[in-house]
């Protein structure tokens, strides 16, 4: 009898995070020894609102939701961060606490770095490429603010089905597959809508053949179909992030690196 070893998933690397990948090789090598690889499980709270948080997180395959909760206990996500960004912007800006909770919504891997260590990197002087880490992270903050603003617009003016399509497409952009595990109740909580609304919207998308949903498992069958139902908010946020990463590379005169994939809403979601 021949025994076969199980195939292991490739180990995560810092380059799987777009911000870390945008750094010059020398700067990444300087920071890499201080990066701590972490596994993030769905539902794990990285930090609560108002809590002291000494680390910032660079996800590689995990997705983190930034969550606000009312006094009555209702909550909704105001942004999601995956391999395109960093979690902990208030800490980077000098605050000791954050106004939102950071909760893992999709399990995966990432890296954490002490906020104080990142601030030390910001304050480095001397050399032609001084401040690239600072430039990369602060430019990302503009992309994050665009996402926050567009989420507010979307929640106010667009249907639950459009919001669900936006969430599905944005989530899949950060994942290597077209499958995810998420209950209707959890999606409703993240979007700040009623569970019945998510169930109805998901039913419409399933009837159209765009997704398959079974016991908390969602498989996207037709991204092009979802793109026909999504509102403009999805494209606005995605294009802004791609533009900022492109600008970072040009301004820092970095060597050519593989850029995150770009999508044409009309044809590429297949």
Image (cartoon, helix red, strand yellow):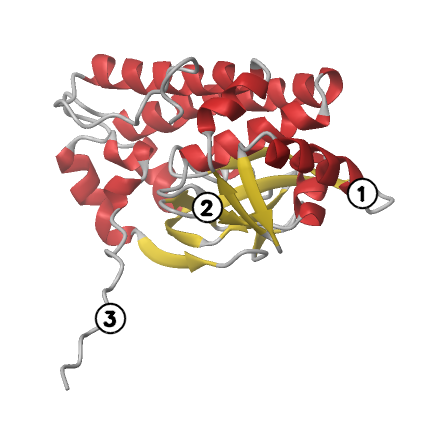
**Mark whose residue sits in front, 1 or 3:** 3
Residue that badge 1 annotates: 74
Question: Residue placed farthest to the bottom in the image?
Answer: 1
As displayed, is residue 111 above or below residue 121? below
Quarter in which the C terminus is drawn = top left
Instruction: Tell me, yes or no, if residue 94 can be seen here.
Output: no
In-front residue for pair 186/230: 230
Could you tell me residue 127's position as x and y percent? Answer: 14, 25
Q: Quadrant of the N terminus?
A: bottom left
Q: Residues within 10 Å of mark 1 (few under 14, many from 20)?
A: few
Query: Who's the residue at 33% across and 26% down the image?
Result: 136
| Badge 2 element | strand
Name the residue: 49% across, 51% down.
Answer: 54
* Residue 207 seen in the current view: yes
Q: Neighbour class for label 2 at 10 Å: few (<14), some, many (≥20)?
A: some
* Vertical arrangement, residue 39 with respect to residue 245, above or below: below
Which residue in the protein does label 3 denote?
6
């Amino acid at each position: 009898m021949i025994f076969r070893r199980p195939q292991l998933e490739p180990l995560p690397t810092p380059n799987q995070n777009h911000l870390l990948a945008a750094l010059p090789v020398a700067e990444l090598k300087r920071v890499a020894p201080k990066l701590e690889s972490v596994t993030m499980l769905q539902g794990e709270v990285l930090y609560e609102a108002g809590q002291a948080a000494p680390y910032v997180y660079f996800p590689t395959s995990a997705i983190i939701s930034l969550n606000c909760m009312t006094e009555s206990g209702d909550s909704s996500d105001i942004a999601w961060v995956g391999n395109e960004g960093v979690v902990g912007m208030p800490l980077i800006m000098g605050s000791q606490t954050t106004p939102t909770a950071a909760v893992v919504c999709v399990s995966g891997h990432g890296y954490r770095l002490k906020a104080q260590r990142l601030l030390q990197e910001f304050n480095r002087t001397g050399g032609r490429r001084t401040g690239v880490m600072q430039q990369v992270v602060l430019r990302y903050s503009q992309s994050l603010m665009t996402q926050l603003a567009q989420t507010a617009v979307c929640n106010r003016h667009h249907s639950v089905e459009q919001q669900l399509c936006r969430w599905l497409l944005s989530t899949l952009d950060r994942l290597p597959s077209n499958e995810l595990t998420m209950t209707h109740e959890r999606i409703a909580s993240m979007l700040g809508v009623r569970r019945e609304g998510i169930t109805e919207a998901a039913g419409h998308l399933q009837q159209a053949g765009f997704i398959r949903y079974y016991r908390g498992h969602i498989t996207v069958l037709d991204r092009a179909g979802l793109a026909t139902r999504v509102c403009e908010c999805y494209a606005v946020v995605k294009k802004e992030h791609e533009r900022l990463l492109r600008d970072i590379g040009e301004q820092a005169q970095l060597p050519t690196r593989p850029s995150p994939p770009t999508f044409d809403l009309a044809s590429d979601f297949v």
